[in-house]
Amino acid sequence: MEGQNLIIIKKVKKNGSGGAHGGSWKVAYADFVTAMMAFFLLLWLITMVAPEKRARVANYFKHFSVFEKTGSTMLEQNKSSNAGLMIGEDGSQKSGEASQPNENTGENEVVTPEQYLKQKIEKQVEQELSEAKEQLMVEVFDGGVRIELMDSDGTSMFARGRSELTREGKKLLKIVGDNLNFRGSKIALEGHTDAHIYPGRDYSNWELSTERASAARKELERNGLPQDLLVRVAGFAATDPIVAGDPYDPRNRRISILVFDQPHPVIVAPETPQQQDKPEPTKPNQLAQVEPKDVPNKPVDPVQQYLFKQ
């Protein structure tokens, strides 16, 4: 092989890490910094959102399922103006009035249906009948709302010693009735008088208070209140004064409207045949001991509870 040129091929293996001058770690570090920036931005946005909205978002993702109710968003769950899904700060769902804006803070706060009815009536009376706002008192009690329409020194619900409604009394009942028609709750009417008596007449505060309660009922029915919502119309004369220290105070002459909550029954799923315990065979000449099954508690009716207290 003399006289021939030899070709030598030299293969050089390079280190894949690139030493100190490699750039792959820079890409990973940039991704890490971007992720951290997005994380802190998310934390900042969460702190800027109202607690009620945070609870709604958390509840949406907690109960979301791709297999049912697809195509709806959490914003569609809050479109109802008066009734719908009410979510507390703990994320629990409640059936009732939708959350209403708080005028003082500008944010939304979750209120109960009773508190919403109280705020709505008081606001409407102040806007449409501001001169009679001292004659209105709305209280929330355990089981419903109590609306007191009282007399004052200058304005009365009824004519003196009679059961005919005045113009101011009809206006007050019109505002209250408009807010009760959409609820569908049971309602009781009570008539009350002061301690003044009518000598020489076969007519007492018992007849007067009862007739005034019935007159208020007729006025509410003329304004659209269904008759099947009424559970009681009664007169109490001067036995239940709102100003106990002064039985002659004009505020004791009033009409009380009680709006009761609807009881929510407890639904108990029946046991399947697989879940039912098989009875043990009884021995001869031995009676089988039958244990009473658990009976679900009957829902408490606020109407019956109130009437029973009376």
Image: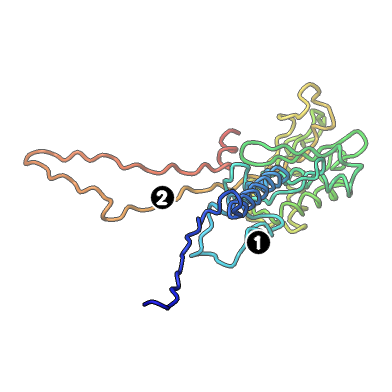
Q: Is residue 251 left or right of residue 262?
A: right
* Residue indicated by mark 2: 268
Q: Position of residue 132 (x, y in %)?
A: 88, 42
Crowdedness near tag 1: few (<14), some (14–19) or many (≥20) residues, C-alpha within 10 Å: few
Q: Position of residue 13 (x, y in %)?
A: 47, 60
Say which element carries label 1.
Answer: helix
Q: Is residue 114 left or right of residue 199?
A: left
The N terminus, quarter of image? bottom left
Q: Are marks 1 and 2 in contact (CB under 8 Å)?
A: no
Residue in the foreground of this view, choosing between 175 and 121: 121
Question: Is residue 189 at all visible to an observer of this figure?
Answer: no
Say which element carries label 2.
Answer: loop
Colour treatment of the image: rainbow
Residue in the foreground of this view, choosing between 196 and 302: 302
The disc label shown at residue 76, or none: 1
- Residue 295 occupies quadrant: top left
Q: Position of residue 238 (x, y in %)?
A: 74, 30
Q: Amino acid at mark 1?
A: Glu
Question: Is residue 279 at all visible to an observer of this figure?
Answer: yes
Asked if 223 appears above or below 244 in the picture, the reply is: below
The disc label shown at residue 280, or none: none
Q: Position of residue 2 (x, y in %)?
A: 38, 76
Asked if 97 appears above or below 297 in the picture, the reply is: below
Q: Amino acid at mark 2?
A: Val
Residue in the foreground of this view, choosing between 269 and 292: 269
Residue in the foreground of this view, choosing between 72 and 120: 72
N-terminal label among 1 and 2: 1
